[in-house]
Image (cartoon, coloured by chain):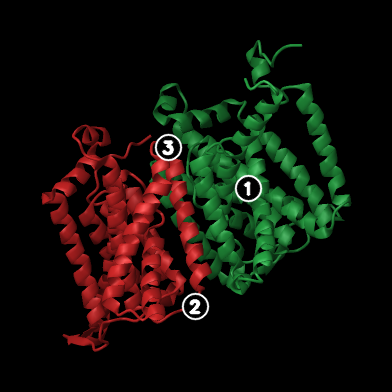
Chain colours: A red, B green
């Protein structure tokens, strides 16, 4: 490899890490819900898209500056999380896995179609607050927004880590995930924990959505990112927060490298497809992921 | 007169036609279905054909998801495989329809076998994700294998013919589909009276217990996958014949959602319910279209966003049925029947 090729390689790795940290953020929300409530949320990508669209709507229609709009969006997504948990998931507590998976699949279809219905399928330029002046670092180019994305992913990961390790509510969430009945007997309000985990997941997803929209554009294809969550969480281990971030980064890397090096031979779709190959491989070799609990029962 | 239907042996309990009453009404229904195509316009025939195809596809999915308890999010991939197999066989190699049709089912079943093998170790969520990945791989192959599938350009489907008898109108296709619906329904209904079908239900209810009582879980799951994808394959083949044109945009993920909605709305793990669900979900876009036309005066933007409107209704229907009526239309039907059976006494 000469210098130019090496630089292309590192640039691909860098952009893979940037996209990967967004995947990691969305996967983090997925894991938060799964850990606390054992619900598989197929609507994670839609929550993310809804957050970004809502923020865009506030800024473009009401001309609210970005920072307050961002904060209002976070409040909105918390309320949305509570609403979804109370109205849709709570009636299904104790129902078979099939019903719970299907209700989130239904929810994702509903949210995606509602966004399409309200805002249409046009592409919007997101009013990004970040400057477009790139930093140059050893021949690599990185934008401030991209740096923020990586920082946000790592920051939120550490916050979650500390929260679950030291905070009382975090400990209560872990206890609920471990055994709902025992947690209930210890005086933990399982209902509140369920709502809280949906709030956290929804907020994290909105942050991911806003960052992603700032990096690229805003359109309805964004919900497809929700699909990248599955390779990421399966790879990282479905109940591991660190695994979600790491899985997201790996998926981002694989996708970008495949897009960079294989798309000439296999066509442009290979970028999206490569992650699914990773997923199938992970399922065949190590279905509980890198850091997950080995609780899969073989039959 | 007895105060109800009482069965005194097991043979009575598993009889397909339980009472003379049911036999009579089934004959009436059959008569109506035979007369129907001569009374209505062509457009309704087309809708009826779509309903029939949906019944076949949804029966397949319900055998897998409802009776065996294996979630599949790749149903539209199997339908696409069936549609493309029959079309490619008849366009490229000139296979006659009567040969291409079963091969479409068989190829789809073999694909089901291939996806079933890595999925055997997986349950619930993992299975859903794996079949989901399978769907994307099939979509990719269809779009990118230009030489075989003509990519995004799509393929036009030649007319189906059966030993010189051409199915060249919607009415003729209607009878073909009606015949196949009857066959597939009868097969599905009988399947659950056999050992294999009982094994499906045992695996759904508790796989470890099934293993203990001597059910070969691996074989059962593979068989269920294959039956499901065979049904999907022939549904795909009929879909291609009905539309007379296929492209990757006809086999979206929304189609899988549609089929899952049919099973859920109709009633998971019931044959009659599946038929109700398939008809309900296929008619739903027609209802939505009426609603859109009514609302388009006030909300002109709705006109161009039919797909979104449809999607939100599917999502809403799935959520509402799961929360308020988990047994689906079948449960409603049973309750309705019981109410009138004992009328005017409540119990």
Upstream in sequence: badge 3 or badge 2: 3
- Whether A4 is drawn above or below A177: the answer is below
Q: Do labels 1 and 2 share a chain?
A: no
Front disc: 1 or 2: 2
In the rendered image, the quadrant that contains the N terminus of chain B is top right
The residue where tag 1 is placed is: B57
Is disc 1 in contact with disc 3, using a CB cutoff of under 8 Å? no
Q: Distance between the residues labelled 3 and 2?
A: 39 Å
Label 3, residues with CA under 10 Å away: few <14, some 14-19, many ≥20? few
The residue where tag 2 is placed is: A122
- Decide if residue B108 is in sight here: yes
- Decide if residue A238 is in sight here: no
The residue where tag 3 is placed is: A95
Badge 3 marks a residue whose secondary structure is loop
Residue B190: image location, x then y, percent = 66, 30
Circle 2 chain: A
Q: Residue furthest left?
A: A166
Circle 1 chain: B
Badge 1 marks a residue whose secondary structure is helix
């Amino acid at each position: 490899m000469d210098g130019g090729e090496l630089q292309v390689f590192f640039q691909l790795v860098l952009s893979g890490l940037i996209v990967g940290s967004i995947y990691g953020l969305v996967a983090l929300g997925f894991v938060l819900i799964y850990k606390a409530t054992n619900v598989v949320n197929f609507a994670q990508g839609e929550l993310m898209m809804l957050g970004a669209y809502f923020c865009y709507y506030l800024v473009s229609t009401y001309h609210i500056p970005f920072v307050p709009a961002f904060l209002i969006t976070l409040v909105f997504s918390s309320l949305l999380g509570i609403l979804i948990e109370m109205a849709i998931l709570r009636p299904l507590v104790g129902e078979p896995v099939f019903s719970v998976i299907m209700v989130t699949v239904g929810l994702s279809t509903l949210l995606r179609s509602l966004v399409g219905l309200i805002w249409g399928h046009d592409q919007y330029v997101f009013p990004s607050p970040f400057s477009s002046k790139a930093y140059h670092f050893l021949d690599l180019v990185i934008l401030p927004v991209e740096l923020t994305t990586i920082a946000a992913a790592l920051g939120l990961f550490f916050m979650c880590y500390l929260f679950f390790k030291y905070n009382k509510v975090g400990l209560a969430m872990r206890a609920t995930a471990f055994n709902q009945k025992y947690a209930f007997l210890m005086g933990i309000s399982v209902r509140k924990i369920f709502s809280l985990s949906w709030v956290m997941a929804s907020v994290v997803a909105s942050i991911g959505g806003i960052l992603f929209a700032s990096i690229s554009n805003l359109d309805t294809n964004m919900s497809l990112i929700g699909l990248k969550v599955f390779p990421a969480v399966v790879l990282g281990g479905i109940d591991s927060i660190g695994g979600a971030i790491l899985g997201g980064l790996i998926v981002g890397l694989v996708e970008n490298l495949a897009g960079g090096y294989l798309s000439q031979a296999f066509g442009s779709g290979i970028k999206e497809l490569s992650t699914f190959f990773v997923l199938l491989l992970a399922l065949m070799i190590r279905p509980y992921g890198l850091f997950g609990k080995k609780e899969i029962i073989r039959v | 007169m007895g105060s109800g239907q009482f069965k005194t042996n097991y043979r009575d309990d598993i009889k397909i036609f339980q009472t003379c009453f049911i036999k009579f009404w089934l004959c009436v229904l059959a008569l109506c279905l035979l007369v129907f195509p001569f009374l209505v316009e062509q457009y309704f025939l087309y809708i009826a054909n779509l309903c029939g195809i949906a019944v076949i596809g949804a029966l397949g999915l319900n055998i897998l998801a409802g009776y065996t308890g294996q979630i599949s999010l790749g149903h539209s991939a199997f339908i696409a495989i069936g549609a493309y197999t029959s079309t490619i066989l008849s366009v490229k190699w000139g296979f006659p329809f009567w040969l291409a049709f079963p091969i479409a089912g068989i190829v789809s079943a073999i694909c089901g076998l291939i996806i079933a093998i890595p999925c055997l170790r997986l349950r619930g969520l993992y299975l859903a994700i794996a079949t989901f990945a399978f769907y994307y791989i099939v979509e990719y192959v269809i779009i990118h294998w230009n030489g075989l599938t003509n990519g995004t350009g799509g393929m036009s489907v030649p007319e189906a013919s059966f030993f010189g008898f051409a199915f060249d109108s919607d009415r003729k296709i209607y009878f073909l589909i009606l015949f196949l619906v009857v066959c597939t329904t009868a097969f599905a209904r009988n399947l659950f009276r056999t050992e294999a079908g009982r094994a499906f239900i045992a695996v759904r209810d508790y796989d470890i217990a099934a293993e203990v009582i001597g059910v070969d879980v691996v074989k059962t799951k593979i068989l269920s996958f294959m039956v499901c994808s065979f049904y999907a394959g022939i549904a795909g083949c009929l879909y291609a014949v009905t539309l007379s044109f296929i492209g990757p945009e006809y086999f979206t993920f929304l189609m899988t959602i549609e089929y899952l909605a049919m099973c859920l709305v109709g009633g998971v793990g019931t044959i009659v319910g599946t038929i109700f669900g398939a008809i309900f979900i296929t008619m739903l876009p027609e209802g939505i279209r009426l609603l859109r036309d009514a609302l388009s005066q006030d909300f002109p933007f709705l006109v161009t966003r039919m797909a979104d409107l449809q999607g939100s209704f599917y999502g809403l229907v799935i959520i509402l049925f799961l929360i308020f009526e988990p047994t689906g239309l079948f449960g409603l039907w049973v309750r309705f029947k019981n109410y009138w059976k004992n009328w005017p006494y409540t119990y």
